[in-house]
Structure formats: C-alpha cells, structure tokens
Image (spheres, rainbow, N blue to C red):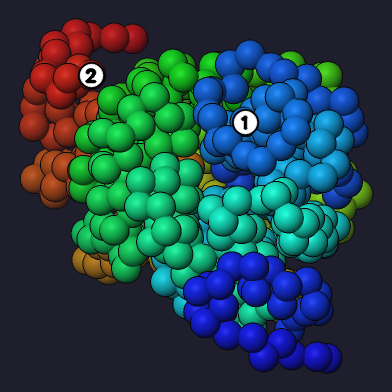
C-alpha cells in the first residue's frame, strides 16, 4: 500500500499546499482498532441520513460563518455545528448534507460531514488505542463504528479538500479547519491522531480567539481522571483551562457547557460543573444527549433526584425520536435508561427500576447487534444488567434464583454476571456448595467470553465480582477473617475501576460488606464500610440507612441533603 511521505507539521505552514497533498494521498495506512468506552450518544448509523433536513427548535445557537453563496446553507451549517456540539451525529450529518445541497460549491459543509459521520466526535477519554496510547496525547482518527460511517467521513474530507482549492471558496481559516479534519481522517499523514491535535493548535496559532477550534481541542484533550484518587490524566487540566477561558468568552455556547460537564466528570471538583449543567439544559432543550448529560454530574455529586429528572426527560425525547425514525439508534436510549435505573437504585425505588429494566429488555436487537457477542451497549442487554443490578442492590435473592424473574442470558458477559448474582444468592442462603458451583459456572462463562472476543484480559469489573463472590462464600462458611480480607481487596479493586457512567459495578462492594458486618453485629466495621460506600456515592439511600443502623441513629433521622448552591439542606424522612 502507498504510504504518504508528506510531513503534516511542515505543510501546516502553507495550508493550500497541505490540501493539494491531501487530495493526492487518499489511501493511508490502516489505523488500529479503537475501543469504545461507553455509548453516551447515538452512533451515526450505517447509511447517510436522508434529506431534506429541517431547521429545528431547541438545538442550541451557534454561528460559525463560512464562505457560501446561500444564506440558507449557512443556517443549516450552523445547525449542524450546534448538533455536533451535542454529539447528535446523525442529525448533524443531515444538516451538513442539506447545507451542501444548497451550496454545492461550498467546502465547509463537507468538513462538517467529515467531523461527524465516523461517530468519533467525543471526549478523549471515550476513545482509546488498543496499544494504550492516552487519548488526550494522541486521539484516534476514528471509532469502532460501522465501516460505512468511517468511509463517509473520509470521503467528505476528500471532497472538502477538493472544493477548497477553487479560488474564493474557502478562507485561510477554513482551509486550516479542513486540514485538521483531513489529518484526522488519515489524509496526507501517517500519524493522523497526533496531527489532528496539531491541526487544531495551528488554527489557534492563526486565530487565538477562535471559539470553535478551542472547544474542539478541549474536547479531545479530555483524558479523564484516575481512580480512586481522581488525579488528572495527561491533557485533562489543559482542557479544563481552555474551557474556563471559553466560559468567560462564550457563556452561551452550548458546546462549552457540554464539554465542561465531560471535562469535570470523574474529578474531585465535579460539583463545580453544576452551573454548566443548569445552563446547558436551558440552551439545548430538544437533543436527548444534551438533556441527559447534566445527570452525569448530578449522580456523582449526590443529587440523585436531579439526575433522575435529567434521564427521564432525555428518555421522553428519545422515545419520540425512536417512534418517528426507524433508523434511530437504541444504544444511547439504553445507556440513558440504564443510568436512570441506577439513580432509582440509589434512591431506594425498587419497582420503578424493575419496570424500566423490562422496558429496555423488550427493545429488539438489530441483526448487526445480534452478531456481536459482546455488544453490552445494546438496549436489551443494558436492560438485563439494570434488572440484575437492581435485584442484587435490593438483595432480592429469591428473584435472582427464579429464572422467570431473572432470565438467563445467552451472551457470555451477561451470563458471567448471571452466575455471579446466583452465587451471591446461594451464599446469602448459607448454601456455599451451590454458591461455589455457580462461581465455577461463572468461570466457564468468562472462558467463553475470551474465546468469542479473542481478548486476553477479562473485563476488570467481572474480576472484582469474582473476588466479591469468594468473599461472600467465605462469609457463608463462617470464615470471617478470610471474608473481610477478600471484601477489602474487592472494594479496593472496585474503587480503582476506570471511571464509567453508569458505574460498571452493580453496587458498591463496601455496601454489601457493611450489611454483612451489621449481621454479625460488628457495628464499627459496618460503619467503616458504609462510609466508604458514601464516599463513592454521596447520599446513597441504602448506605445512609446502613450507616445510621451501625451508629445506632434512629431511622427517622436522615443526613443532610445538598442544595444546588452546595449548602446543606435538611432532607427529612422519606419512604
């Protein structure tokens, strides 16, 4: 295969030359596979969205002036940029295609398609090379999405390059934007990941106050924070600094507030994003992901009711979109409702959690989803996980052992969780023999998972689960010293799991250990465990109840809630 010899840094000094070289080097070296960290936005789909597009309400207002002969094309381009800022890839692509139809000679609408069609316009921490290169340092050129989407993005970048070579059709600034996305799509460079970042930095060197480029750079630099100490990974604090500048310079830009939420989530200062949570939801009222995202921050800062309200509102929008568009992806809806189930779990609402889980389980998989044995993000598989985690959280052991209430799944990842839950149920029934048999069956499911996925390393959350199951068996056998040691190890490992929303572990290990310590009347030990659980998840109802029981506090007295301003508010007793 031909390997382009053009050096991106040298070419950036002369954007038109870069564009000429890019168009001549359409075939770049194959890129490494990318791991999908979560499904926090709908993917763009296998095929381009059909036209015509419509100018919609509630998308957020963004103005990105481009070279065009059509005022209508500018309107649809602006709408596409606004939709891109809320990760609505499919609708953004539709808007950009409409702009291109209105002005076939304009290159920037094709820049827009190149930005969104591959489905990889996401925070850096959601994208990861299989060889472990940090996303913030070297963001990947594309995502593990349908091949058609990646091809559409690359073809669009090629088209933007070609159109921009016509005199008067692209400004120098626009050519720099096109150069950056062409690099990301592997055109004219053998290092597309790093060169995308270099391209964005080149735009800011040319136009230091360019809001759009600064926001794109901040987003891709967001590498998240370590667990459990919440220290920033490389790139994260540069992203934070860029976004603080943008909050002052563009306080009504929807993308800025969106990226603040992503940039602050998982950090020690997550509550500092509360104002952006409020503002983002006010600026963008009709895009499900925009309505959903404040829930991330609210959930990790103990504002469970606010988180649930965000997820409920997003689910209402998505149900309408799914009813209107048969090609609308269900993965984000599954993610959103799964997270809603988690908030209900932490609030102590069992039946509503169960009902929502069954709703997700009723959503059929597409043929492509069925062909993926590890497609954990599908709506029905997330629904099953929501059902299982609810029954485990509320310790409904009878339901877990009843296949009509917790049906056995056919996919190996979910089957491993199924066996884990049953092992816990038998341990709580003091049947360590059957608990150990289920643990053995869990190992078989994990072996099958390795076989079908061809992966060497097991999912970290399932390794924690296995250790907790061993702790539960030791407790059932009366080997308390071994049990506490295993619980401590499992809890430490669980808290070290990489940040993911909703949490990849069904409920805090420390919460389960605290309940067992109470059973042994070891109140001091129980209090320690419940304090750990509350540090992980502030205002968790079951952990608060456990801590009060361990401290001998009457059930009617509750700990203080937290207001939007951060001040304590007396919550009162609730049932």
Q: Nearer the viewer, residue 346 or 143?
A: 143
Q: Is residue 197 visible?
A: no
Look at the image and tell me whether residue 56 can be seen.
yes
Does 32 sit above or below residue 154?
A: below
Q: Is residue 485 above or below residue 364?
A: below
Q: Which mark is residue 60?
A: none
Which residue is labeled 2 in the image?
564
Q: Residues within 10 Å of mark 2 (few under 14, many from 20)?
A: some
Q: Nearer the viewer, residue 328 or 418?
A: 328
Nearer to us in this view, 515 or 139: 139
* Observer-nearest of 119 and 490: 119
Q: Quadrant of the N terminus?
A: bottom right
Label 1 environment density (alpha carbons within 10 Å; few <14, some 14–19, many ≥20): many
Element on which disc 1 rests = helix
Q: Position of residue 393 (x, y in %)?
A: 44, 37
Residues at circles 2 and 1 in contact by the CB criterion of under 8 Å: no
In this rendering, position of residue 368 left or right of residue 42: right
- Image check: 221 left or right of 569? right
Q: Name the residue located 73 percent from the left edge and 55 percent from the top edge.
A: 167
Taking the spot 69% from the left edge, 69% from the top edge, the residue there is 19
Residue depicted at x 71% and y 37%: 68
* Residue 91 pos. (x, y %): 73, 33
**Residue 209, above or below 138:** above
From the top left corner, tell me how far across and down residue 324 is, in percent. 83, 19
Q: Which residue is mark 1?
A: 78
Name the quadrant of the C terminus. top left
């Amino acid at each position: 295969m031909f390997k382009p010899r053009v050096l991106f840094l040298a070419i950036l000094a002369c954007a038109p030359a870069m564009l000429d070289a890019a168009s001549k080097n359409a075939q770049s070296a194959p890129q490494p596979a990318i791991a999908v960290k979560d499904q926090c936005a709908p993917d763009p789909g296998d095929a381009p969205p059909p036209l015509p597009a419509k100018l919609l309400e509630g998308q957020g207002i963004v103005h990105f002036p481009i070279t065009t002969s059509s005022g209508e094309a500018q309107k649809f381009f602006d709408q596409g940029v606004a939709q891109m800022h809320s990760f609505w890839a499919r609708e953004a692509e539709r808007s950009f295609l409409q702009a291109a139809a209105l002005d076939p000679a304009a290159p920037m609408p094709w820049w827009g398609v190149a930005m969104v069609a591959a489905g990889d316009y996401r925070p850096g921490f959601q994208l990861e090379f299989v060889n472990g290169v940090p996303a913030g340092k070297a963001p990947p050129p594309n995502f593990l999405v349908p091949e058609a989407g990646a091809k559409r993005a690359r073809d669009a970048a090629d088209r933007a390059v070609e159109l921009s070579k016509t005199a008067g059709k692209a400004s120098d600034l626009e050519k720099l934007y096109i150069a950056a996305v062409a690099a990301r799509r592997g055109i004219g460079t053998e290092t597309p990941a790093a060169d995308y970042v270099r391209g964005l930095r080149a735009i800011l060197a040319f136009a230091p106050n360019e809001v759009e480029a600064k926001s794109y750079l901040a987003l891709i630099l967001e590498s998240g924070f370590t667990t459990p100490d919440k220290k920033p990974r490389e790139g994260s604090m540069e992203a934070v600094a860029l976004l603080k500048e943008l909050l002052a310079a563009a306080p009504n830009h929807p993308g800025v507030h969106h990226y603040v939420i992503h940039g602050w989530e998982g950090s020690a200062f997550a509550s500092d994003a509360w104002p952006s949570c409020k503002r983002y939801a006010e600026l963008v009222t009709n895009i499900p992901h925009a309505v959903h995202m404040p829930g991330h921050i609210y959930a990790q800062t103990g504002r469970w009711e606010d988180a649930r309200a965000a997820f409920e509102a997003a689910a209402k929008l998505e149900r309408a979109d799914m009813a209107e568009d048969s090609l609308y992806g269900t993965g984000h809806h599954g993610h959103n409702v799964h997270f809603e189930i988690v908030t209900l779990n932490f609030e102590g609402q069992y039946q509503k959690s169960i009902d929502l889980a069954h709703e997700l389980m009723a959503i059929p998989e597409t043929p492509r989803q069925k062909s993926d044995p590890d497609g954990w993000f599908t709506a029905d598989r997330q629904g099953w996980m929501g059902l299982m985690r609810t029954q485990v959280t509320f310790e409904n052991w009878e339901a877990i052992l009843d296949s009509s209430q917790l049906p056995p799944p056919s996919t190996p990842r979910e089957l491993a969780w199924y066996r884990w839950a049953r092992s816990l149920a038998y341990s709580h029934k003091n049947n360590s023999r059957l608990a150990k048999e289920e643990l053995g069956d869990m190992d078989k499911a994990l072996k099958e998972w390795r076989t079908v996925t061809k992966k060497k390393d097991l999912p970290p959350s399932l390794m924690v689960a296995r250790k907790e199951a061993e702790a539960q068996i030791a407790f059932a056998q009366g080997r308390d010293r071994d049990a506490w040691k295993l619980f401590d190890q499992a809890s430490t490992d669980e808290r070290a799991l990489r940040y993911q929303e909703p949490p990849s572990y069904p409920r805090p290990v420390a919460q389960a250990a605290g309940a067992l310590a109470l059973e042994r009347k070891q109140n001091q030990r129980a209090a320690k465990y419940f304090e750990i659980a509350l540090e992980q998840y502030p205002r968790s109802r079951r952990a608060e109840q456990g801590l009060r029981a361990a401290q001998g506090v009457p059930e009617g007295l509750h700990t203080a809630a937290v207001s939007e301003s951060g001040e304590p508010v007396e919550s009162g007793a609730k049932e």
